[in-house]
Image (cartoon, rainbow, N blue to C red):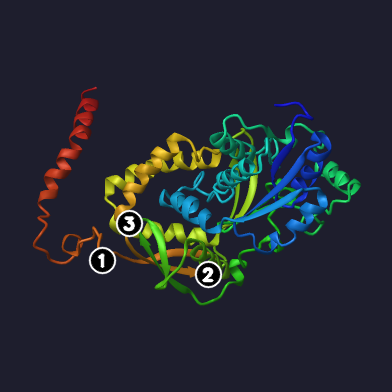
Amino acid sequence: MQKKGTIKKAVLAYSGGLDTSIILKWLGEEYGCEVIAFAADLGQGEELDFIPEKAKNTGASKCFIEDLREEFVRDFVFPMFRANAIYEGRYFLGTSIARPLIAKKQMEIAIAEGADAVSHGATGKGNDQVRFELGYYHFDPSVTVIAPWREWDLNSRTALEDYAKKHGIPVPTSKKNPWSSDRNLLHISFEGDILEDPWAEAPEHMYVLSVAPEDAPDQAEYVDIEFKNGDPISINGEELSPANLLAKLNELGGKHGIGRVDLMENRFVGMKSRGVYETPGGTILEEAHRGVESITMDREVMHLRDSLVPRYAEMVYNGFWFAPEREALQTLIDDTQKTVNGKARVKLYKGHCRVVGRQSDTNSLFNVDFATFEADEVYNQADAEGFIKLNALRLRIRSMMNSKG
């Protein structure tokens, strides 16, 4: 860590929220350096409208807003969904998968602008500090990273709000919505305030992307999703770009109250934390992807891939997107997806989505002649007797040995 005063220019990953607004001002005061604000457009919508003006008013010399929506879904979300990666069986990794892309673009700006440092607003207790900084060091092993939460004495929300008032920085939190949130095309997350009580139910007015399941339409809706090499390419016959496809699924899922998750997760740094998430489109996408895999993927290949899913999800959650082990595993996973071509029909109804149909014209491994309960000429059922006896041999031997004992 270089001493204060030696940094001339820093690029800050800036959201316009409480933390990064204060950090922007703090960097200028504490380090006396020029600060460039960078915000990644990952699908936050109107949340980005006020950022350039606010960044300038808070002391930024420049403010970059980069539209990364297509790259985010195509090169980060889709590869992760080819792996069916869900952390601890519940979390769709919406925040985790966004951080390596933000770090990538932030480093590109730092190089282009001749900055000698990068900074972020992640706390010293969370996972994001790891995700951001592993990304920074991947692109520049010698980069200087400024992590204010690990330096300053503003160790509470109250202290931050006092600092903001002192410097005339608008405070985006309120008594009505006091929790922190992170939004992109894959999800929106909520943490803090009332959610720090693991027994307290999240208030209904907190949710943004979905209606309450009990308020969803009484009529089910059917959606056909087509896949090519494991990636979705169309909805109900309409081909869409990756970002537009996920946005459409968010709209459909949100209307039916799909994708709400309330969980206690194990952070990489060692503590448990509570998060509430809305992932409507991702929930539908994972279900549909599984449906097409079920008819096109070889059994042992599927079982091998599934055995690696927890490890892959941990890599993403812990910030090792650019690590060689994730890249090697991605190569294996992508190879398993070459036959995942076809359609899944998903039924959406009051918070639930499930595959009710699947088909593949080119890669289906389902053969009705073998699987039928009716008469067939391709399968001799008597062959099963020898198959069963061979598989039972070790169990029979153990039983005989126990009987002797």
Label of residue 361 in the image: 1
Q: Quadrant of residue 44?
A: bottom right
Q: Earlier in the sequence, mark 3 or mark 1?
A: 3
Q: Amino acid type of disc 1?
A: Asp
Q: Is residue 90 above or below residue 283?
A: above
Q: Closer to the camera, 119 or 334? A: 119
Circle 1/circle 2 CB separation < 8 Å: no
Q: Is residue 51 left or right of residue 164?
A: left
Work out whether 248 lies above or below 286.
below
Amino acid bearing label 3: Val
* Relative horizontal placement of residue 289, taking residue 256 as reference (left or right): left
Residue drawn at (61%, 54%), measured in percent from left and top? 277
Q: Earlier in the sequence, mark 1 or mark 2?
A: 2
> How far across and down, in percent of the image, does residue 191 sit?
69, 49
| Residue at the extreme bottom | 219
Q: Mark 2 or mark 3: which comes first in sequence? A: 2
* Front: mark 1 or 2: 1
Q: Is residue 21 left or right of residue 139?
A: right
Q: For mark 3, what is the residue?
A: 340
